Image: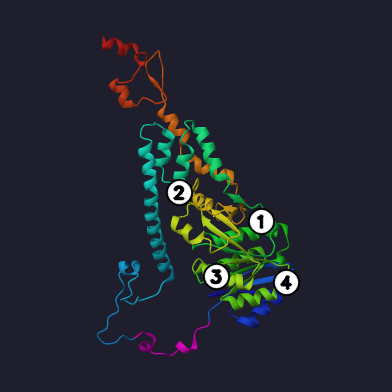
Amino acid sequence: MELKRVIGKDSKHAMELVRQEFGPDALVVSSHKVNRKFEMIVAVDITPDPSLIDQTDDLLVEVKAQGEQKQTPRFSAVLHGEQNQEPAMTNDRAQEIVNLFKTEMQLLKKELAQLRSASAWQQHNTGTDNRLQTQVNQYQLPSTSKLLILDAINDITCPKEAESRIHDLFSSSLLVSDQTPENLSGVHAIFGLTGAGKTTMIGKLATQFVTTSHRDSLTVISFADQKLGAWNQIQLICSALGIQCFRCADRQMLETIIRELPDDQCILIDTPGLHIDQTYQDIQSVVPDALMHLLVNAEISRSSCEKLLNHELGWDSVNIAEMSPQPDTWVLIDALSQQSQLHLWVKTTDGDLNQPVELIDAGRLLEGAIQRLSLTDSQDLNETVEDPESGRQIGEETTTLDYLAGLRADPNDRSPKSAQNTH
């Protein structure tokens, strides 16, 4: 089924339009007032293909030659690019996963080559006892950032000073945009991998926009997204906010809709998670001055960074979806530090459309990443202070087993009765 939107002067007029266009048996999903008019959302059946009606099963099923058996290709054959077997079915999403896996393996080889330099640093500093460098070296950091940090804190023993040095090392390369979402204008296209949260981000931006501006000045477009339920989700969001939305299957339809909309209209375009390069080129060819925004997961993989954050795609902003509390953002920070022209914009923390997006604070983003290195905690745990009166170590609690065994228990902690029994 597919949702259709009908607008009339009042409820009676809207119902007449529904009956005229979709018949008396049309299913009305919702109805409410929008800008002094009455809107109805109608669920209609998809029109069947007449060429497939009254056809025998033999004509609808692919007939194989006698003795020919179509085999599913082996995973190793797909991975290494062997073409001796024809795939049984083309799946764009599966192919994308395979490509990401290949990229991840290539990046791991590159990481191993770079980590050889780190091992040379370890051999050079075997005589020094720097707990901070040891702590950083044990953490799973991208090799480029790890070598930079190890070199920056080479002569530092104070954790606070080391954290400050690391903060200064990356803060200059993290640029931010101060454009408030409430004051959007022009055309904005939201890109990202499948499941990144593009539709949710558009819903949040639209919610913030309608609170400060007129609903008639905002339009949402779903462009070439064939994912199941994506268009219905856009329809429900726009229906709840009282804004208009369109669905475009290709570049020609997008060009037609953009041409019909007023010049002062703010447009948000939702894009598919597959074929990002082609979608980017299509939108740019139709609207050259459109702003391209990339949405990534805070814990993005190295292969996704290699695919999205490259020089071929010029992003006007990079946005973050924090899907877990206190995420590990070192891979993203490492990639952004190597792209000086990229700007951070907003972040989303949940799927609640009423919860607005927040402008990214580069300082807080770095502080959260540096805290995961646990430089201060590792220093505190390695340092113990002795109590001269009891001989016990302060800073490390005595376990129950140690107390019963009497290894580190204070004689003054024993009761008088138990003390007498010992004598």
Q: Amino acid at mark 2?
A: Thr
Lower position in the chain sequence, tag 2 or tag 3: 2
Name above or below for residue 162 compared with residue 242.
Answer: above
Q: Residue at x 47, y 52 (%)?
A: 299
- Name the quadrant of the C terminus: top left
Lower position in the chain sequence, tag 3 or tag 4: 4
| Whole-percent x, y for residue 155 in the image | 47, 33
Q: Secondary structure at mark 4?
A: loop
Q: Secondary structure at mark 3?
A: helix
Q: Is residue 34 magenta?
A: no
> Disc 2, disc 4: CB below 8 Å?
no
- Tell me where the magenta segment starts and ends, as one range: 47-62
**CA separation in Å, label 3 and label 4:** 23 Å
Q: Amino acid at mark 3?
A: Thr
Nearer the observer: mark 2 or 4; the answer is: 2
Nearer the observer: mark 3 or 4; the answer is: 3
Nearer the observer: mark 1 or 2; the answer is: 2
Lower position in the chain sequence, tag 2 or tag 4: 2
